[in-house]
Image: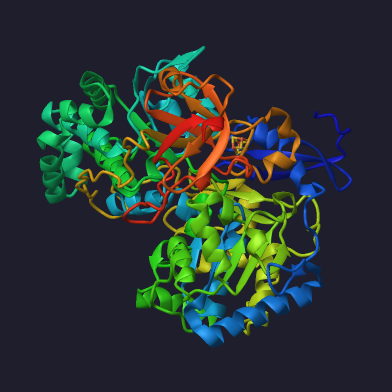
Amino acid sequence: IIEHGQPEHSVLTTCAYCGVGCSFKADMQGDRVVRMTPYKDGQANHGHSCVKGRFAWGYASHRERVLEPMIRESIDEPWRKVSWDEAIGYAATRLRGIQEKYGRKSVGGITSSRCTNEEVFVVQKLVRAAFGNNNVDTCARVCHSPTGYGLNQTLGTSAGTQPFDSVMDADVIVIIGANPTVAHPVFASQMKRRLREGAKLIIIDPRRIDLVRSPHVQADYHLPLLPGTNVPVINALAHVIVSEGLVDQDYVAQRCDPDSFAAWKACVLKEENSPEAVAKISGVAADDIRSAARLYATAGRGAIYYGLGVTEHSQGSTMVMGMANLAMATGNIGFSGCGVNPLRGQNNVQGSCDMGSFPHELAGYRPVSDDAVRGSFEKRWGVELDPVPGYRIPNMFDAAIAGEYKGMYIQGEDIAQSDPNTQHVEAALLAMDCVVVQDLFLNETAKFAHVFLPGTSFLEKDGTFINAERRINRVRPVMKPQQGKAEWLITQELSQALGYDMHYASEAEIMDEIAALTPTFQGVSFDFLDRYGSVQWPCNEKAPLGTPIMHIDQFVRGKGLFIETDYVPTEERSNRKFPLLLTTGRILSQYNVGAQTRRTENIVWYHEDLLEIHPHDAETRGIQDGDQVSLRSRKGEITLRATITERVQPGVVYTTFHNPETGANVVTTEYSDWATSCPEYKVTAVQVAPAARR
Ligand code: SF4
């Protein structure tokens, strides 16, 4: 499937799938890509790649791609193809009309973690400067927003602490709620190299992921906790470390806030956090908790890597802080081989958060309510900004159903498929007077749209992505925008039609403005990146060549702040009617809701979303391997095929969410993280029965 002809020239760019951010040479024949070759000098991938980056780029020229703008009065009408001017003018008129009728705050926008920093920055500017409110949020809301909150509270910055290469100095690696071999394969390979050299491995995950036992790697401890019990398990690990005198006292005394440490210590020493007590809640053997805690605290350099199995919970932010507490208590932040490291799902989750996509923060995570911060943006943008934070994505849906939020500009996210509780999302979209979707394909959300503005693939973009290690990578266009317009230009023209002109002439100018307004990006420009390849922020006067490792001499916030992490069980409980707990994940060849990978050569590796069920649970329900089963929660019901496996423990079932026909999010709930509203995708009480028995 890779034979497309011999290349004539190459363009160096960045993979647009996961947060590893691999560099590739797009090998070209004229203006046609014939091959993606992993770049040997890529600072995140060192010449490696996975099947997504290597083969899954054909969606850029897929026949279903929409290349002309379209409008319609109502969603019952057929789409009408129109010129760019008409589509943008129509969107502006409808959105402005809504604001005149329902008020300035009745519209907003969503930025995409699939888009470049420059595209994202322009969308949040559109909302703030042209709409005149802070109703902007990012699709990172539904994945890593607890990372931003938790790491900022404890350490002082909303990002991971280490470069990927740091794992080669780790003596013990802790993987929590992540499945790197399928979701971050290139980094997983690097991790495996270190494990083969002798580093120890602890895995905390409800499911037996590949790294628990693979041909060359075996975990020293797998703590197969029940979904929803991350916080008690991290507290129990801390309980052991404190009660057995394994705290790095010198580090804590020098680097951390003493009062917060004392309070945290008292919290984790409570009897309810003892391994025996937590074993009853989590299902993890007390002895394994003790042994894993001792290993992490005493093996040398301990590195924590985590994913959405941490964040997508009602206590996602609490768990992020729990991991930061543990790392500080054992002196595991501030040098190579350690740290607390989010494995970001999408290519530009870090960047979309950095760019000011949150309703309470401007670029660089600075509060919009802060007069001085807001003032610097007002001066540059020549407009007065609203100091009041706007709606988060779930609040947008609630406000729409309440009749207070009537218009939305959605950049590159399929909220009708990817957000939880699909019925609620659809009801919100139906309640709006104008939905503008900017995307490659007529996705599920576009069914509710009045304006469709065709977007560009990464092969047509000029700009930057930021990977999970804060690395700002260049994305270079290998072909012209196939629909005729760069995405930032679409947003800029919409802004102009609404009466606010941004005056950018190029993507490089947008980055120059980001650098001028954001202290952590001060030294970044396209010229700089072209000269040095990439750079890890902060990149400024103090760190002109970037900052691979954070918090070296002191934490960004000064003293590291311990935060008490009391366990509050999720409202989503199993019971007699819904006795099993569903959790979700991915397969290697596919990506998220599959909008791109299902339209590429990777389709050869794809079959369908399957329900993994333990043999005991299958037998008691009369389910045979391969049977169609009904999966039902309090929110909805779907049908899919069962696969019987001991990868899941009794009482837990698991599926992927790559296929709109399966619609896994029909069953997920409205519960969310207490601090950030990140949805609780990872815990849903369900019943499973043979489909015919319904
Ligand atoms: Fe792309 Fe991630 Fe695979 Fe690298 S590991 S090629 S960034 S999907």
Q: Where ligand 1 lies, by image quadrant?
A: top right
- Which residue is more in the foreground, 136 or 557? 136
Q: Residue at x 70, y 34 (%)?
A: 54
- Which residue is more in the foreground, 512 or 55? 55
**In this view of the protein, can residue 34 be seen by the observer?**
yes
Determine whether, in the image, residue 190 is placed left or right of residue 617.
Answer: right
- Which residue is more in the foreground, 45 or 397? 397
Q: Residue at x 42, y 26 (%)?
A: 207
Q: How many marks?
A: 0
Residue 550 in the image, given as x and y percentages of width and height? 38, 45
Rendered image coloring scheme: rainbow
Q: Residue furthest front?
A: 693
Determine whether, in the image, residue 305 is placed left or right of residue 381.
Answer: left
Residue 36 in the image, given as x and y percentages of width and height? 74, 36
Res 682 → quadrant: top left
Determine whether, in the image, residue 671 is placed left or right of residue 211.
Answer: left
Res 221 → quadrant: top left
- Above or below, comparing residue 497 to residue 389 in the picture: below
Q: Quadrant of the N terminus?
A: top right
Q: Residue furthest top?
A: 215
Residue 609 in the image, given as x and y percentages of width and height? 59, 33
- Above or below, comparing residue 622 to residue 496 in the picture: above
**In this view of the protein, can residue 185 be seen by the observer?**
no
Q: Residue at x 10, y 34 (%)?
A: 271
Q: Residue at x 68, y 72 (%)?
A: 74
Residue 402 in the image, given as x and y percentages of width and height? 44, 72
- Above or below, comparing residue 134 to residue 665 in the picture: below
